[in-house]
Image: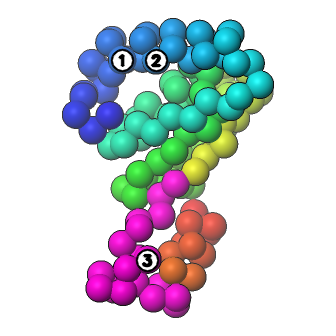
Amino acid sequence: GEHISEENFTRWALPAMTEIAAELKRRHPTVPLMVFPRGASYSLAALQTAGYDVVSVDTETNLGEAASALKAEAARTGGGRVAALQGNFDPKWLRTGEGGSVEVVRREVQRMFDS
């Protein structure tokens, strides 16, 4: 995702990803589909509409804004289904050599909850 413009994503990647989601849903209707468009948070709502059940976000994505975008897209499309949102935790906080500690992990997880 981080290596494609929004315009090219919409033109080229989204139709293919929509087709992939539809085929996977046809073959495995009970298995949730997850997608991780690193660096392309602009695509989350479209991927939800394309049929993905879980959208993962990178550490640069604001969870609150992403959640709002998913809810707004569900309302706009009348689908009512809002994809689960996951991610955003920077794994560097798990490494003491990069400033991680139990306290930092707690702080960062609380920040995620708050957003």
Q: Secondary structure at mark 3?
A: helix
Q: Amino acid at mark 2?
A: Met
Circle 1 residue: 13
Mark nearest the camera among 3 and 1 is 3
Q: Tell me the residue at 74%/18% (across/down).
A: 29
The magenta stretch is: 87-104
For residue 57: magenta?
no
x 45%, y 88%: residue: 101
Check residue 94 in the rendering and tell me which mark sits there, or answer none.
Answer: 3
Residue 47, horizontal then vertical, whole percent: 52, 26
Instruction: Note whether 86 is above or below 5 in the view shown.
Output: below
Which mark is in front, 2 or 3?
3
Which residue is identified by label 2? 17
Identity, as a three-letter code, of the amino acid under mark 1:
Ala
- Out of 77 and 15, give the one closest to the viewer: 15
The spot of residue 73 in percent (x, y) is: 61, 29
